[in-house]
Image: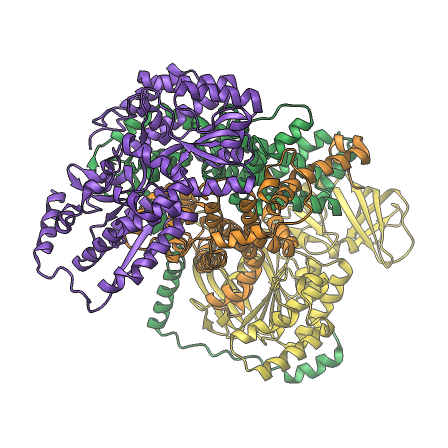
Chain colours: A purple, B green, C yellow, D orange
Amino acid sequence: MKKAFVLLALLAVIASPAVLPAAAAAPVDLTFWYSWTDKIQENNINLAKMFNETRGKELGIRVTAEYQGTYDELHQKLQAAYVAGKTPSVTVMEIASVRRFAESGVIMPLSPYIERDKIDMDDFFKGLLINCNVGGTWYGLPYLRSTPILYMNATLLKRAGLDPSGPKTWDELAEYCKAIKEKTGAYGITLNSDIWIFEAFMLENGATTLTPDESKSNINSPESRHVFAFFKDLVDKGYVRCVAGEDYGKVFADIMNQKTAMFFDSTADLTYNLELARENGYEINTCFIPSKKTYGVPTGGCNLVLTSRQTDRERDAAWEFIKWMTDSKQAAYAHSYTGYVATRRSVVELPEIRTLYKETPQFKVALDQLEQYGHGRPMNPGYAQVMVEWTAAMDAIWSNGADIGSTLSAADAKITRMNMLGAK
Amino acid sequence: MGNREMEKAMDAYVPLELPMPKAVAIQKLLRRAARAATPYIMVAPAILTLCVFVVYPILYMVWLSAYRWDMIGPMVYVGFGNFAELFSNPDFYLVMGNTFKFMFLTVSVSIVLALLLAVYLKANTRVNALLRSFIFVPYVISMVSVAFIWAWLMNSEYGLLNFMLGKAGMSGVRWLEDAGVAMYSMIIVAVWKGLGYNVIILVSAMHAIPNQLYEAAALDNTRPLRAFFRITLPMISPTLFFLTLMNIIAAFKVFDQVALMTGGGPVNATNTLVFDIYQFGFKFYQLGYASAQGVLLMLLIAVCTAAYFGALSRRVHYGGGA
Amino acid sequence: MTGIELRGVEKAYGGNQPVIENLDLQIEEGSFTVLLGPSGCGKSTILRMIAGLEKETAGEIFINGEDMRGTSPGARGIAMVFQNYALYPTMTVKENIEFGLKNIKVPKAEREARVDEVVRMVGLTEYINRKPQYLSGGQRQRVALARAIVKKPRVFLMDEPLSNLDAKLRAQIRTDLIELHRKLGATFVYVTHDQVEAMSMGTDIVLLEGGKIRQQGTPQSIYSAPRNLFTAQFIGAPPMNVIKAEDLGPGAVSIYKLPRGTASLGFRPEHTVIGDGTGVPKGVDLFRGELVAREILGDHAIYKFKTDLGIVHAKVMSGSIVEYGEWFVGAERKYLYCFDEKGDAII
Amino acid sequence: MRVQMPAFRRASGGACRTAVNFLIFAVFFIPFYWMFLTAIKNLGQTLQTPPTFWVARAHWENFNRVFEAIPFFSMLKNNAIMTFGIMICQFFTVIPAAYAFARFKFKGGGFLFGLTLATMMIPAQLVFLPLFLMFSKMGMVNSYASLILPWATSPFAIFMLRQAFKQVPQELIEAAKLDNANEWKIIFKLMLPIARPTIITLGLITFILNWNDYFWPFVLTTDNTVRTLPVGITSLNIVDGGVKYHILMAGNLLLVAPVLVVFLFAQKQIIKAFTYMGGK
């Protein structure tokens, strides 16, 4: 009932003739919430400033960008703000949380705006749109999106006599690890219990972490057991080191010290990893995550969404800001500044992007992988709790040597009994 | 007294005639009423604050524990559903086990060590005073600092502890990553932080014991160990009793350390009840479930405190010693 | 009707037996009245009721004719010196003394003058800025006294103020109090269990036991004319020798021509006659006793005899020291006091 | 004749004693030294195996990185506002309540004191959920009020101060009454000065507990406007992409420094204050 009401209100707005007078009397002040620091923070601040100096000045809109910490912290604050009744106008939203906030009416459908301004949705890469749509309505536009890729210390690979362009299949991956360990003494891979990377492994086995209707988990499925076994075998042989917990800190310690040759990480950290490599005197190569039955990667990162509790004037101005931010020129800027994938095909044709791909081909890797093999992420609100179970299973099996069968069946039993994915 | 002054005082002395106020009935009544109301006025600010910020939230939590709610969606009444789910969740028993294990070991080790150190550092020499200050520093600084220092010390690859173990010929320990070891690492850190406070309090309690008792004991040529159990321990038992209770409550509500060092630890090995409540409340947005856990924690603390008072209060010796 | 009067005063703690029952007491204005009695006889309670620190469960208390019901302690025109001095630990000597005057808003100039005068009076001028914990017992006691005097009260109440002092200091302060009382002329109500203090300072002594007055009168009359056995034995050190009449043998009353109904006989130790059994002075009845303890105190000596009739003490002012051994002790008829079974004196 | 107490001390003599002293010193000093050392190393040096115990050139730029990453001084200000705000509130709620519980017998007095004792047992972690919702509804999340008000009173302080007031001898109160002092004069001129040492100790405890508190500000603040240092330093730890222990330890050092400085200066008072407490 809540969604219908919101749709009606929106249509009324569209009907009004002058959508937005060119030079509105008083400027509209918008707040824009974003996550993460370093390169990503600089990118958000620069884009907001550029908007205020160009499109914003024309339309009389002023945007202030506010840092809100990690995605989890941002979502917590959004809830508190919603309960308190004063949410920001525009915010980034981690793609797996879009459905939960859409169904509870915190964010608004964008479909009416998209139809009105005739936004070419096909220009966006198909893989990125899955997590922008809830029940047939658009709730967000792809902004800073990423996919996981395989990073390699090319210098170590060369020293181990391996082709620096990287392994193509899981078997090659195993051989690479064996060779690196024997030839250089470093670990083949340093892995941490990251559910997002696990989703890629599942996709490559033609499966997903949750069943297509997202009602049950596949943690105890044959594919899942296979993935656990594959890496447990490498860990037992000492070719791969697994660090407990989600936090990346320990992984990077090994990379910087060249104690490991390969690691899975988001393309968003590309510029950071390139810099790190320069600082510590080695070269970084990137390639698709090696395929099992097929290639396959989940997408990640965040969309831009429109919050519901604001006046019509603010809402229209907010939409203008979202439209501008996701336009191909801005998307290109974000892509080259951070390493997040280009979100639209039109971005790739831009001259500055072509030269970028010539100079640093690593930028293109994630894009190619995304085009053919990009998939969405589960959006069931209960998935947050399932992820904790999955991480615990990875910790148990990979870092604490637990038995695969019993751990996975116990976890699956718990997920169903706790009705984590249950209907509302 | 100087006689000369007395002489002079004599002539100046005139009995003081006090103005006896005409006791108007109303005035006295007013004063008596104000007098009766004073205690309530004085207690009001504190009690009001407690009601608004402790009593109301607890009642609200008990009420909320009967609902399933994710803070922004609709509230669904589930009655005892949350409690049923709570008791059917195997992790719950693991978390309870962790909480009691952490509480029991931390408190017992800390108190025993504190007793030993208190006796050892009781004498007021300069060295002792310096050592007492050093031991006290960890209590004064924030748990954030302590957690990061020890997370870095206990780092499997680059930590100092493993380096020292290596030097001593032993193999490195994955302090915070090995499910079996993680909880003991947490206990080491908790004892390291709280020891100073316990030692200082016990030393002061020991200083309050009159020295004649020990002199008398020496005359009866009592062996020092016996003197400790027959004189020192009974005499400091009230302080020890109170201190242990404070330690228990503090150990029960540990959160910072778990959140900062291990986030519940490998495979929930260091997850304690309070951190679990936070996790369910703020990560999984299951406010009803978290409230049910909260109600349970409250009952547990009440039972533990009551049991503690019942069991030990009889053995505490009150009263002076001279 | 000046001075302090208690009419039908009763005091019971909680529901149980009243400590003081239907007490009528007159304290003459300007007198140095001592409330004397063993501990637990209610003397302090009476003092505290006069001070208004404890509420009487029944009866009235008048000070200079005014009914003190409902009047706060501060407004009764009295000052009190406590047994443990009750000095304010966080205030200096000067602030302690000045505190009372400040509360009744005495102007600064007058206050300074009166404080200086009293401080000189008690000889504490050089300790004026010290905190109580740095003073000796005697000095603290004098501060407590100064604090009382400075308020120029009509009545001084004192609750065993000397009990915490050493013997020599106690003797010295006793004479100072007598001197102070004579000079100030105010009414002193002094509580003690030490009969020496009572005899030395009191102009009027009220002997109490179990909340009842056993005798009230001048020290001399209390000493020489005890109206009951309790008074007789309580006053005087060592206490009066008391012998049961029947111990003297059957029909003793008639033989010694004692007043009818005598149950016990008493005589003061200074009237005890010691003899070797020969040359008995007229009118003295002697009986055998063995000297068991001797206290030579310089100007006098005290002898303790064990006789068939119980312990008998003798106080000899001068003369040669009596050797241990068998002696005959007794007392002249005119020094004998007779008491009936109830313990009342038979005059 | 000072009696030497435990057997092992008497039998061991000097040598063993210095060894044990050194052990205590090591256990409680080396972690801080290691923190300081890491704070002045660069990234490479922190990851060196075997770790070095001294650094030729101190990398002070780590501290600049901390100041860039978090608004250090505004957080320090927030810390001060929160802590002293709480101390002031507690001053005005604890003292009158403790005095009333100690000196007055009034109907319901027993019950209210029982309530106070009961709330002493309730940990903050138990009530944060309802309070978070309450403050959200009132739009007070990210405000000083939400950090200070829940701590406006301390049942522990009331309990301790009531003990101190109860130990003032009744004679003093009576002497003051005889000196015509009214109720407020008795409180301010007599009772408070006597209870001053306890009040100072409780003030110190409140300062230490609230200045260092991580949980409450972490839960109740969602951005840096009112966030305090402990929480700020923690966000250093979630710096995306990498283990920057040298920066984390630099931040940690900055967090520890103010409290350490206060402790070094007021060391005697603080230890004496706590010793005084122990005697209760």
What residue sits 22% from the left and 46% below the top? A106
Instruction: Point out the image quarter for the N terminus of chain A.
Output: top left
Q: Position of residue C171 (x, y in %)?
A: 75, 63
User: Is B78 drawn above or below residue C213 in the view shown?
Assistant: above
Instruction: Say which of A349 and C192 sits in front.
Output: A349
Q: Which quadrant of the figure contains the C terminus of chain A?
A: top left
Question: Can residue B195 be spotted in the picture?
Answer: no
**A157 relative position to A119: left or right:** right
Viewer-nearest residue: A56 or D79: A56
Counting every numbered tag in the picture gives 0
Taking the image as shown, residue A343 lies to the left or right of residue A243, namely left
The quarter of the picture where residue D27 lies is top right
Residue A227 horizontal/vertical position (percent): 37, 20
Q: Nearer the viewer, residue C190 or A398?
A: A398
Q: Quadrant of residue A247?
A: top left
Closer to the camera, A204 or D166?
A204
Image location of residue C32, percent across then percent down? 63, 69
Q: Is residue B194 left or right of residue A189?
A: right
Q: Residue at x 69, y 46 (%)?
A: D56
Q: Is residue A368 left or right of residue C95?
A: left
Residue D31 shows in the view: yes
Give coordinates of residue B75: x percent, y percent: 21, 39
